[in-house]
Amino acid sequence: MKRFVKFGVVLAVGACATSIAYAQMKPESAIRARQSIMRVMALNFGPVAQMAQGKQAFNKDVFVANALRLESVWAMNVTRFFPAGSDKPVEGSKIAGFTRAKPEIWSEMDKFKQAYDTLGQALGKLSKAAKSGDEGAMKAAAGGVGKACKGCHDDFQAKQ
Amino acid sequence: MLDQPARVWDLPVRLFHWSLVLLVAFQFTSGYTGGNVMRWHMLGGYAILALVLFRVSWGFVGSAHARFASFLAGPRAALVFGKRLLAPGAAPQAGHNPLGGWMVVALLVVLAVQAGTGLFANDDIATEGPLAVLVSKAMSDRLTGIHHLNHDVLLALVALHIAAVLYHWRVKKEDLIRAMFTGVKRLPVELAQKAAAARFASSGLALGLLFVATLVVWLLVSQTVIKP
């Protein structure tokens, strides 16, 4: 019982520490982290989308592996990497020299988090379809993911 | 002073115009939708590029009223015609009037820019144009930005074009829409007789030019000649 309580305390403190850490993360680190997450997302979604659009030969194993990776990467919750002050690029930084984060992310944080959840749900559907092995369902689910990505970008990512 | 029917628009010009209307409408909606429909958006872009190339070539060797030389006017002529348009009374023209002529050029240029930049564009997610591999990400991003900006310019031109056509129809009593379907305009006798003497180029030539235009676009985007 004592060990269980100790473990629980460590877990709770750890969770608090990590969330405090992200909230007070330096803008430079936060920008780098969230852009890295998005890049890994794009890296994994690329082949999935290409297969869904028929531009690449359909490979079930690749599709399934990527779909599952997308889900676990997204679970990192990129919305946590937007501390105050990270709306501007860091002058002279080699890792955070630009950001396309729109001010709406902070002024409409609830909507931003909702967009995050929307993609999470689409990724859940993607994984489910991938596991089912139904090629048609997998392609349709991939389309849903692309749409969710675009939806959030349209609202919260500055155009080039 | 009864008006006479006169054939002014050949079949290639009419097919070109209405195909473009359908394609551009589809491009706007598919671009907004995103997702799996982007595959069709890109095919639509290739089709528009081929049509634009065709129309430019037709503007040099096509039927009389399709040729740029027959309807492009200087700024003074355009201004004079503009005043006539605003004044009461009819202002019939056999082919494109001086202002309409510049709208043709403007639309062709803007469509070419839109389709051209689209070839290099990317959406950061999973879709990119067939030539995006040829340039740096930064350049692709810049061209994507132009693709988005130019989209607004195109929308404004389309709205202006439709407004102008409606003005001609309701205020100037010229049914330009019907004319672009049937190819026939009702014109004052002198204009109608002049139009009757105009040379029409063969549809066979048009088909040949369209084939060449399609071939050029295919070579550009199929990644058989330009390899990534």
Image (cartoon, rainbow, N blue to C red):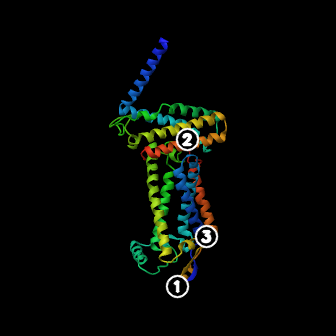
Residue at x-position 66% and y-position 35%: A132
- CB of mark 2 within 8 Å of CB of mark 1? no
Chain letter for the residue marked with disc 1 in the picture: B
- Asked whether B122 or B215 is in front, the reply is B122
Q: Are marks 1 and 3 on the same chain?
A: yes
- Asked whether B196 or A27 is in front, the reply is A27
Q: Amino acid at mark 3?
A: Leu
Camera-near label (2 vs 1) is 2
Classify residue B169 as left or right of residue B202. left
Residue at x-position 60% and y-position 41%: A141
- CB of mark 3 within 8 Å of CB of mark 2? no
- Dot 1: what SS? helix
Q: Earlier in the sequence, mark 1 or mark 3?
A: 3
At label 3, counting other C-alpha atoms closer than 10 Å, the crowd grade (few under 14, some 14-19, many 20 or more) is: some
Furthest residue toward bottom:
B1
State the residue position of label 2. Answer: A145
- Dot 3: what SS? helix
State the residue position of label 1. Answer: B190
Q: CA distance from mark 1 to mark 3?
A: 24 Å
